[in-house]
Image: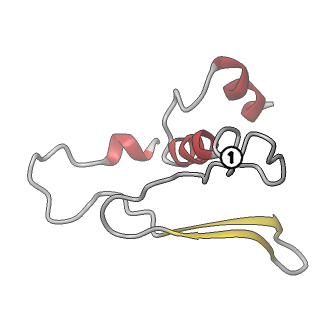
Amino acid sequence: MSILTQISQSPIKAAPDVWIQRIVLLKQITPDPVVIRDIPLRKGLNVIWAEEPESDEDTGDIAGHSAGKTTFCRLMRYVLGESTFSNKANMQATTS
């Protein structure tokens, strides 16, 4: 059963039905967890952004476009059980 079907539809809420406090991406779980990224989230609005490079010639780090903002949002939608978290090709790749 999807978590979205379990959420209360009451217009007045004392607290969120779902609260994502922290995202931890792991390279491996066993024998010992190896953390790739630890992303804390806070109450209220969390803005996902990537700093743009200083000049057009700056090709060092990934910045702005292709930094993973949409992928992060799709991950949250997938974890919450949304059936349309991505385009058809990507959704099929997660089930194969």
Residue at 74%, 39% (x, y): give it.
56
Position of 95 with respect to 23 (left or right) is right
- Disc 1 residue type? Ala
Position of 20 with respect to 7 (left or right) is right
Residue at 69%, 50% (x, y): give it.
53
Q: Which residue is mark 1?
A: 67
Q: Residue 43's spot in the image, x, y percent? A: 33, 68
Residue 64 falls in image quadrant? top right
Please name whichever residue, 36 or 84, is drawn nearer the observer in this view of the structure.
Answer: 36
Considering every residue shown, the one lying at the far right of the view is 31
Residue at 18%, 43% (x, y): give it.
9
Above or below — where is 87 with respect to 2? above
The colour scheme of the drawn protein is secondary structure
Position of 76 with respect to 58 (left or right) is left
Residue at 29%, 48% (x, y): give it.
7
Give the total of numbered labels. Answer: 1
Q: Residue 49's spot in the image, x, y percent? A: 53, 51
